[in-house]
Amino acid sequence: PSFKKLTMSLSMSNTALRNTVRRVATRQFSSAASKSSASSSNNAALLTGLATLGGLIYYNQQVAAPSTALEQSKDVLSVDDRIAAEIESEKQKFATYWPRSILILFGPPGAGKGTHGPKIEDMMGIPQLSTGDMLRAAVAAGTEVGKKAKAVMAAGGLVSDDIVVGIIRDRIKEDDCKYGFILDGFPRTLVQAKALDEMLAEEGAAVTKVVELNVPDEVLEERICGRWIHKKSGRSYHIKYAPPKSMVSGEDGKPVAESMKDDVTGEALMQRPDDTATALVKRLGGYHSETVPILEHYAPKGIVKSVNANQKMDGVWGEILAALARGAK
């Protein structure tokens, strides 16, 4: 009966369909498919697509087609082409990027993490976790580890690696992380990387991909020093590559600060205090000295992928997709 309910849900809206499939596919799909009798390859492909929406990759199995319950639901299975195409798209996505993806995204300031991180998040349906955001959320929620962090910060101290790892442990137990997550800003040191590995091992998981966005230092100066941001939303602009619509240049060719407005809200943009050539030298020195040991730590596992981020955006995105694909070399 539950599996019949699953097939009947095809007449529901797309959002409701996704939610229904995810709830019952894990429990019902395997047994129902094994009891089916061979008939229609189209229905077999459709059932395979439904399973992948729930995180089950049966795309390489000989899925026998309709059982008696499905025979009675032929009209329901006659979904329109748009939904069928979307199901097929979801099937291919999970077939390519499954199993659970635990991704660490590295890149020096200005490499494009802020641009491509959200795209990965949207494409794979997994959240990008910022240690700063998680820390603030834990403190606000008054969790046990959040209380420890608050006490340390109130005393003017630095939050320890153990506390940060504890915050991550709590966060990844939430429902939106069940298919994976992207870590941004952690680990920053080899000690943190090892602590992360130990924590994930306790959860029966491990880092699956480490992607580094590579850009020559001399190129980064132009990117960083031309960057303006909208503080509330985090939207980023660049005077050369992505200027706001309101930008006006002065006689010296530089943008007039008063003209730098957010395209969406019309609010003033700002430059970060450390987005200067002088500060960048120090930031890059720290990044290289801290990141190389982490990459060397994960390299023997065959999960470190380097992306040339010094090219057009489409090219960078293409390399990122290739790096994320299951079995990528």
Image: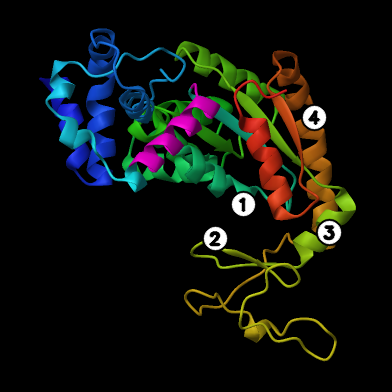
Mark before the other along the chain sequence, 2 or 1? 1
Would you call the spot at circle 3 few (<14 residues within 10 Å), some (14-19), or many (20 or more)?
some
* Residue 130 within the segment the image draws in magenta: no
Image check: 219 left or right of 211? right
Image check: 22 left or right of 275? left
Q: Which residue is mark 1?
A: 114
Residue 49 against residue 232 in the figure, above or below: above
Task: Determine contact: label 2, label 1, CB under 8 Å.
Answer: yes
Mark before the other along the chain sequence, 1 or 3? 1
Residue 102, located in which quarter of the rendered image? top right
Name which residue lies at 18% across and 31% down. 74
Would you call the spot at circle 1 few (<14 residues within 10 Å), some (14-19), or many (20 or more)?
some
- Residue 281: image location, x then y, percent: 85, 52
- Residue 264: image location, x then y, percent: 49, 74
Mark before the other along the chain sequence, 2 or 3? 3
Mark before the other along the chain sequence, 4 or 2? 2
Q: How far apart are labels 4 and 1 at the CA level?
A: 21 Å
- Could you say which is closer to the camera, residue 23 or residue 184? 23
Q: Residue furthest right?
A: 218
Q: Secondary structure at mark 2?
A: loop
- Residue 6: image location, x then y, percent: 19, 28
- Could you say which is closer to the camera, residue 37 or residue 173? 37
Q: How far apart are labels 1 and 3 at the CA level?
A: 16 Å
Name which residue lies at 22% across and 16% down. 28
Q: Which residue is mark 2?
A: 234
Residue 297 against residue 78 in the figure, above or below: above
